């Protein structure tokens, strides 16, 4: 790509970079707010009162608070937090030729019609020759 063509191309797509940067920043802010909200909420711990613990478990030396392996961070997928930017439709792209109408797609084609007529004629001649008596010919 020549340098002049590259500049022209960049001028055409530069506005897309600005839109992407804005939506990317909005996504980052939404993710950060979500993380802050999750870490700010108190984690409920289900601790049993001492009176509710069975006496047999403490006599046998059972662990009162089992230590669990640290859990992996769970990622919750909830969809897009920011709507996708509206990209303007390019009107510069044109089709090479207009689409064919249904009548043009299904309509009669004289060359094909002639081909089928010729093939049917040849088949009829072969059937006539194959079924004829030899004495007549």
Image (cartoon, rainbow, N blue to C red):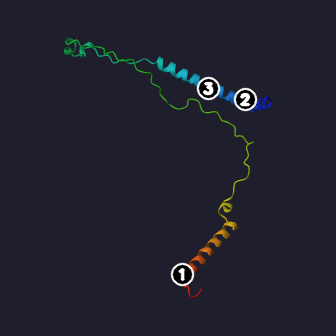
SS at circle 3: helix
Q: Is residue 49 above or below residue 79?
A: above
SS at circle 1: helix
Quadrant of the drawing holding the C terminus: bottom right
Q: Residues within 10 Å of mark 2 (few under 14, many from 20)?
A: few
Foreground of the two, 24 or 10: 10
Q: Is residue 131 above or below residue 8?
A: below
Foreground of the two, 75 or 80: 75
Q: Residues within 10 Å of mark 3 (few under 14, many from 20)?
A: few
Find out whether the residues at labels 2 and 1 contact each other: C-beta distance under 8 Å: no
* Picture quadrant of residue 59: top left
Whichever of labels 2 and 1 marks the residue nearer the N terminus, that label is 2
Q: Position of residue 13 (x, y in %)?
A: 72, 32
Q: Is residue 55 above or below residue 133?
A: above
Whichever of labels 3 and 2 marks the residue nearer the N terminus, that label is 2
Which of label 1 and label 3 is nearer to you? 1
Q: Residue at x 68, y 28 (%)?
A: 17
Which residue is labeled 1 in the image?
A: 131
Which residue is labeled 3 in the image?
A: 24
Residue 99 visible to an observer of this rendering: yes
Question: How many numbered marks, from 0 up?
Answer: 3
Whichever of labels 1 and 3 marks the residue nearer the N terminus, that label is 3
* Picture quadrant of residue 85: top right
Q: Position of residue 79 (x, y in %)?
A: 52, 32
Foreground of the two, 53 or 105: 105
Q: Which mark is residue 14?
A: 2
Quadrant of the drawing holding the N terminus: top right
């Amino acid at each position: 790509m020549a340098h002049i063509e590259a500049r022209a191309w960049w001028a055409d797509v530069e506005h897309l970079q600005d839109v992407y940067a804005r939506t990317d920043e909005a996504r980052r802010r939404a993710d950060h707010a979500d993380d802050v909200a999750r870490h700010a909420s108190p984690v409920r711990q289900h601790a049993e009162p001492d009176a509710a613990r069975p006496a047999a478990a403490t006599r046998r030396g059972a662990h009162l608070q089992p230590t669990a392996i640290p859990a992996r961070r769970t990622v919750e997928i909830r969809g897009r937090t920011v709507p996708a930017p509206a990209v303007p439709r390019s009107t510069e792209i044109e089709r090479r030729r207009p689409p064919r109408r249904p009548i043009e797609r299904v309509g009669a084609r004289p060359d094909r019609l002639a081909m089928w007529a010729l093939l049917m004629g040849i088949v009829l001649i072969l059937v006539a020759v194959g079924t004829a008596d030899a004495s007549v010919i």
